[in-house]
Image (cartoon, coloured by chain):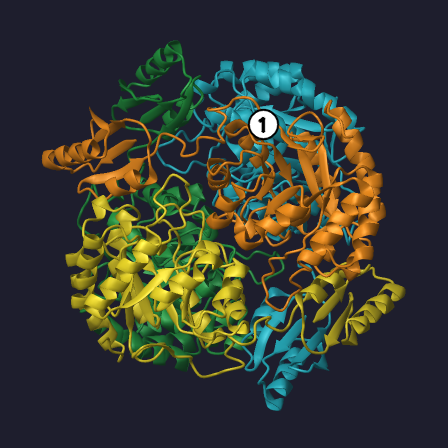
Chain colours: A orange, B yellow, C green, D cyan
Amino acid sequence: MIIAMKSDATEEQINDACESVRHLGYTPHLIRGEERVVIGAVGSGEKEEHLQALRCVPGVADVLRILQPYKLVSRELKPQKTIVRVGDLEIGGNEFIVMAGPCSVETREQLLETAVAVKEAGAQILRGGAYKPRTSPYDFQGLEEEGLKLLAEAREHTGLKIVTEVVTSDDAEVVAEYADILQVGARNMQNFALLKRLGRAGKPVLLKRGMSSTIKELLLSAEYIASHGNDQVILCERGIRTFETATRNTLDLAAVPVLNELSHLPVVVDPSHGTGKRSLIRPLSKAVIAIGADGLIIEVHPRPQEAWSDGPQSLTLPDFAELMVEIRRCVGNESRHIN
Amino acid sequence: MIIAMKSDATEEQINDACESVRHLGYTPHLIRGEERVVIGAVGSGEKEEHLQALRCVPGVADVLRILQPYKLVSRELKPQKTIVRVGDLEIGGNEFIVMAGPCSVETREQLLETAVAVKEAGAQILRGGAYKPRTSPYDFQGLEEEGLKLLAEAREHTGLKIVTEVVTSDDAEVVAEYADILQVGARNMQNFALLKRLGRAGKPVLLKRGMSSTIKELLLSAEYIASHGNDQVILCERGIRTFETATRNTLDLAAVPVLNELSHLPVVVDPSHGTGKRSLIRPLSKAVIAIGADGLIIEVHPRPQEAWSDGPQSLTLPDFAELMVEIRRCVGNESRHIN
Amino acid sequence: MIIAMKSDATEEQINDACESVRHLGYTPHLIRGEERVVIGAVGSGEKEEHLQALRCVPGVADVLRILQPYKLVSRELKPQKTIVRVGDLEIGGNEFIVMAGPCSVETREQLLETAVAVKEAGAQILRGGAYKPRTSPYDFQGLEEEGLKLLAEAREHTGLKIVTEVVTSDDAEVVAEYADILQVGARNMQNFALLKRLGRAGKPVLLKRGMSSTIKELLLSAEYIASHGNDQVILCERGIRTFETATRNTLDLAAVPVLNELSHLPVVVDPSHGTGKRSLIRPLSKAVIAIGADGLIIEVHPRPQEAWSDGPQSLTLPDFAELMVEIRRCVGNESRHIN
Amino acid sequence: MIIAMKSDATEEQINDACESVRHLGYTPHLIRGEERVVIGAVGSGEKEEHLQALRCVPGVADVLRILQPYKLVSRELKPQKTIVRVGDLEIGGNEFIVMAGPCSVETREQLLETAVAVKEAGAQILRGGAYKPRTSPYDFQGLEEEGLKLLAEAREHTGLKIVTEVVTSDDAEVVAEYADILQVGARNMQNFALLKRLGRAGKPVLLKRGMSSTIKELLLSAEYIASHGNDQVILCERGIRTFETATRNTLDLAAVPVLNELSHLPVVVDPSHGTGKRSLIRPLSKAVIAIGADGLIIEVHPRPQEAWSDGPQSLTLPDFAELMVEIRRCVGNESRHIN
């Protein structure tokens, strides 16, 4: 921790600040610059509270954190990449993963038709929401457990693994009963009660970045899950909120190599929510492979114009099959494989 | 709903789009412009799904919504302002409301000392977190029910009403047992399970705007609570996330008159989280009164430099007493009163 | 300057970093923490280049700046507030300043009618654009020198001072010939050639904050003008660009007290561009007075529905007269005066 | 243009609005919905002023634009891609273009050493700033014409084309004398005087997106150049400003396919400014190729730790040579070529 004093701080204030540093369990080191005094605080376990508290001490201009606040999910702690295992599937290894399916589970026909098609095209995991977090209370809220049963039936039928969203800790148990991977949606990235609950879920978690969350906050949310007992976390970049309106969100692809530098967890990208526009899925999927992500999550619907949610960003089944040919080619060019 | 066709849309595509409009239960009205065709869709109950679905129809360039998606909380539906009653206190009327207290309930001494002081200075409501949503799992997470008991004791002792946060629907019942007003924090503004639960809480709700939520989304979250049975909602502006780093958040004061135009619900402002800096609380509080908000929520701590959270933005007890003198003067200048 | 080494930095890398610090003319001070080494660099004249260059040294994790990069405009250097004098008018003193007028100078009738009305209502300065920076090349670009002549005529007729925009250094001379205050628009806040030129203009400058500029960048742009010879600078908050679409921009009112802490320059606020909506001008103007700004700049047009630009945010002449009654009342409540 | 009336608009207000539409030269078409009336305005040349003016008409709730405001640069007008020719080099065709060089021209040795190395590695164009727009007046401002002469010497020596920035219309002539491509920096994207001047420059222009400019605004700035006589414009995505601080800017890669849909102009990407971090250049360069951009612009310096600007994001000469091997491989995989 570094405490910068104001240029007009008195000797007494400097002494008081050093005393406060000691009071917090750190050892102060004074550096007298030409314009101001800076205090280095040496010790372990740097906490947010300490940082904040010292800003109140008279004469202090600023307090700067040196250490990263996350531990278990950091590369510094564990340099080798984590592989999340879902049955025989390895996420974070040399295989490139494609999760595909509808935004919402709507009907048995819709889901099974989609599942068979994405399996045939080469996807390994079926996505589909049974519990839907919707901005408006008047929009379709999901089939709930009925939807989970349809997902399980689709798995039975195709062999695909299942990823689906949990929207509240109350539902964690029932979702974990049916799903292979539990998804935390962007709006719930800082629903800490849910994160703690998923720490005890015994199943891998797909953690989506909040639409205005920093990379550091995403890693701290992953740290919640890990520190509560579950280190099987897959991070997901899905676009952040900016002033730009040409796309639904701004997909922050640089987050992929940044996350790979800071953390050992696998990283996948969702270009469907990231752009909100069907025509952009193909070029962005190619970029996602090139930049070194571990997988893609893509919305697919047999009849997007009739979808109950996210129609404009959903691919048709033939579009998806065509995209998979291109994905396979690009994955091969990066010396990785798919299936 | 307005559907703008592409400039090169064929007659067949235009016919198909009209058919899709009819299929959704609306009547299409064609307008042939010099460069493109626009279709007006007449009907009721405009839904997000419809908007989205029509964007997939070939030849469609854009779909524009005309109606606001929220109903119960809108001024169009109910022109007169809502007054939220908490015992004998009226929020949204001519009295200006001040909620004050520590970020977190830490100890009995800390809470009671603060409660007595803010009561004496003229606050009507005591704030204080017993369940704390913290970005890092290693930061203080709150005293939980023990904290609620201390809040109830402080109410007993001072006559102040109590507002405190619920972080998950699991805790709604226990918090509602102790608190007078249930707070939804910024990170939970789109925790729809929680919002639905608070629709059945039987107590007023203080709904904080998410740090990257639009005003429309805030109103839709209020609509969740209202449409599930609880119209006693107080809206709270607490700053949004922007690129500016000089303040913790950017307080969007224009949101107050915008909300007053669009909705009948009372609006309060939190300059403590909005700025993150003690020296800014006074000027911003004055601006909040001048702009026509119904109240303020302010963090106060007996010893901010020892606070377990939010120290730098907390006022000391004497600072708060001094601020209340100024608040009282400004409120009087606006022909409103306090106590 | 503070250089944080990586936790796995070698002794050789630490020595090399110290050497680099010396090479830049600073003295290194080593602090050995439990997890990593931090180097404090003592010396004067901390420059952006130095900061950046040290980030390239192997083993360095981060470089943190301690000193503010602006000098002449800072409160640390000059604690007493600057008063900008425009004839007998003092901006930054106890008088509250209102600048009012149309977005664009359109016709002689429009300008004179407005000037007479805003003078009568109590404004001290007439605003109006003769050179217009417009997003589209097909929109009205201003009357140019003809507009300046009309502004001068309006000054002659009413005694109002004139503020008008300079869009390029080429026009600085001709605008300075006619205007009392030279305005730098938001899009030009980092047009450094223009800023340098205005350093030699011999007239006060109204510097608008860029729509995505930080407060620090605004002060550095003011520093450009000051360091090139002109310390008569008025800062103007006019809203920043965020994700919110309910208002044209997000007016950052907290910037006013922040600027007052960091700088001695006067600060005015433009709620017209800040909100883009006529109905919001009155509540925001009141907040601007309460928060301690030195003045307001407001768009007024005799017939907003016929305005060639910014109609929706312009007040009519009677609306403005009514607003001035309220402004006068609020200014009096703050123990300041107007005229 | 679509005018949505308020739900409580009177028949008189609706008539007045229709009259206003006619007054602007459009034909009104009334659609009576269940909740409100919408007016379609048919005609050509939809202008920003018209949109704005109608928002002032009593009873009008909102005005929506249907047509895009840019023409010459749009794909609707000219479906085939524009090829910008610089001598024998074609930008926007099947060849992938790499522009490389230092942020600033510092010395003859630095520039020539870099030029020789990037030529040898396979770059086609040398970048380097002679006029530098710097946030602080105390930072290095560039060698000016001396720098241009060094660039010309480097071209002579290596055969590379030259791209360099013009910061003000005053310098346009002298820069055009030396450079092959004139660069408009992000801070000048809405310096309309400069854009107009470059419309008459007779040389291709590289137009960088402003750091908080929308894609629509970027295209309107290109329209300024095109409508003033110069259709040889290359668009450049270089990152936008968001709340994220892990990278210098957020590179908006989706902008590439969006621009390709909306416009026929070539698009290049600058990952150096887009990320601000050397380790991210390689993964992002690969993504840029995969997503279908026409080229890259990359900062390279013989000794980044001694660079006078942008050291941390500059590649060393060997790093760049290594990157070019990978770039060549990826370009080949996309059936494009380089040299």
Q: Which residue is mark 1?
A: A82
Residue B158 in picture, x, y percent from top left: 20, 68
Asked if residue C141 is positioned above or below residue B308 in the image, the reply reads below
Q: Amino acid at mark 1?
A: Thr
Q: Is residue C298 above or below residue D318?
A: below
Q: Is residue C286 visible?
A: no
Is A287 displayed left or right of D188 in the figure? Answer: right
- The part of the image, by quadrant, that contains residue B296 is bottom left
Residue A14 falls left or right of residue C42: left
Judged from this view, the residue extending furthest toward the right is: B12
Quarter holding the C terminus of chain D is top right
Q: Is residue A227 visible?
A: yes
Report the chain holding disc 1: A
Where residue D27 sits in the image (x, y, percent)? 72, 78
Q: Residue at x 40, y 54 (%)?
A: B250
Query: Residue, x 65% and y 78% (percent of image)?
Result: D21
Name which residue lies at 15% across and 37% down. Answer: A9
Residue A326, position in %: x, y?
80, 35
Q: Quadrant of residue C87?
A: bottom left
